[in-house]
Image (cartoon, rainbow, N blue to C red):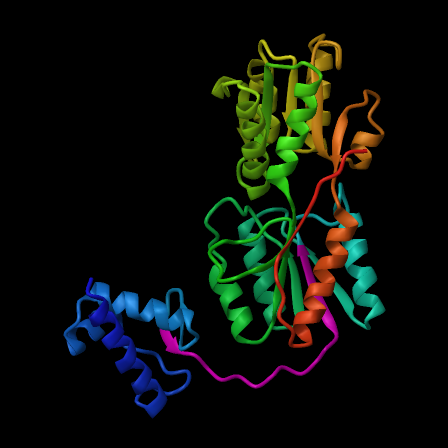
Amino acid sequence: MSEHKYKELINKLQIDIQSGVYTSGQKLPSENELADTTGYSRQTVRHAMTILENEGYLSRIRGSGTYVRNSLPRRSTSHNIAVVTTYIGEYIFPAILHGIDEVLSQNGYTTMLSATRNRVDNERKILTDFMQKPIDGMIVEGTKTALPNPNIDLYIQLKEIGIPVVFINGYYPELKKPIYVVADDRAGGQKVCEELLKKGHRRIAGIFKSDDIQGHRRYAGYAEALRAAGISLNDDNVLWYTTENREDLMAVFSLRTLENCTAVVCYNDELALQLLNILQENGVDVPQDMEIVSFDNSTLAQLSPVKFLSMTNPKEQLGQLAARKLLNILQQNEETPAVLPWGIE
């Protein structure tokens, strides 16, 4: 593709928009139609329109077309903040939500909570509902962040109507310059595996979640620690699961995955407790025959009858920082993502 050609077309479309040939909110001709009328190839047209979209001239709505971006009036302030997480009343989420609400309430904001249960269909419904409500911004825990997300168009629309979003725990790389607060999962995976290596373990299994980006990053850190120790990673000793199939996969494949291993890195405490029960039911002595390490240091780990190392999640701090970043954005200030370290207690 000639750089000269697509830049020519960008210049022409910018002039058409600025001169009123295409007015604010107007739908543009399709890529095929523009290719026919301008004489440029469809590839050149698509490239030019993508750049104009990134620069804020155009907005693409899936299933509808490409429009000249509206100059929308600033929304009236409601002092409501929508908070969307995968779950609400269980596991680490009460601590995260407490951190969010503490900061928002101190600044005169009301929190409106919803949970997706890590389902993209629920996420779409929740986002659509909130777009019709008086809210100033959103704090969102992404749904199945390791997979292509079918709701990206709604996040783009939220930005266009003046509702900023700050992500927690994970985010969607498809979005342009998302603001997020996450734990350093790659470093956490490396650190927890290194703790096992220090104890002399050399055959270390791993069980990770495949539909959330946190699982991929914890796996990456685990793999790096093994490689740094001169140990080859064996695929037979790694088990991947999703939100929907954890129970079935663990029941059928967990013992096979741990064969010939003396330790295992678990994605989180929920998984670690499930594995502990399976091992005990099969006569495996934990931690004598199999040492478990995990993430989150939740009440599940703290109250477990068999103690195991669980990395400390900066959950309340994460919620507080996400809320502060959103408030800063609402005050028209620039913000940047934040990555928080895991700890060991």
Please provide percent x and percent y for residue 306: 81, 20
The reply to whether residue 136 is in sight is no
Q: Residue at x 46, y 56 (%)?
A: 174
- Image quadrant where residue 134 sits: bottom right
Residue 168: percent from left, percent from top: 65, 53
Identify the residue shown where x is 32% and y is 70%.
49
Q: For the image shown, how many numbered marks are present on the structure?
A: 0
In the displayed structure, would residue 191 be above or below residue 283?
Answer: below
Name the image quarter holding residue 329: bottom right
Front in this rendered view, residue 48 or 138: 48
Question: Residue at point 73% right, 58% down?
Answer: 321
* 26 relative to 238 in the view: left or right: left
Outermost residue, bottom direction? 19
- Residue 187 is at least partly visible in this image: yes
Query: Which x, y percent locates residue 16?
Result: 30, 86
77 versus 117 height, above or below: below
Residue 13 within the segment the image draws in magenta: no
Quarter of the C terminus within the rendering: top right
Between residues 88 and 52, which one lies in front from this camera angle?
52
- Where does residue 150 sit, x and y in percent of width and height? 46, 55
Q: Is residue 154 above or below residue 263?
A: below
Boundaries of the magenta span: 66-84
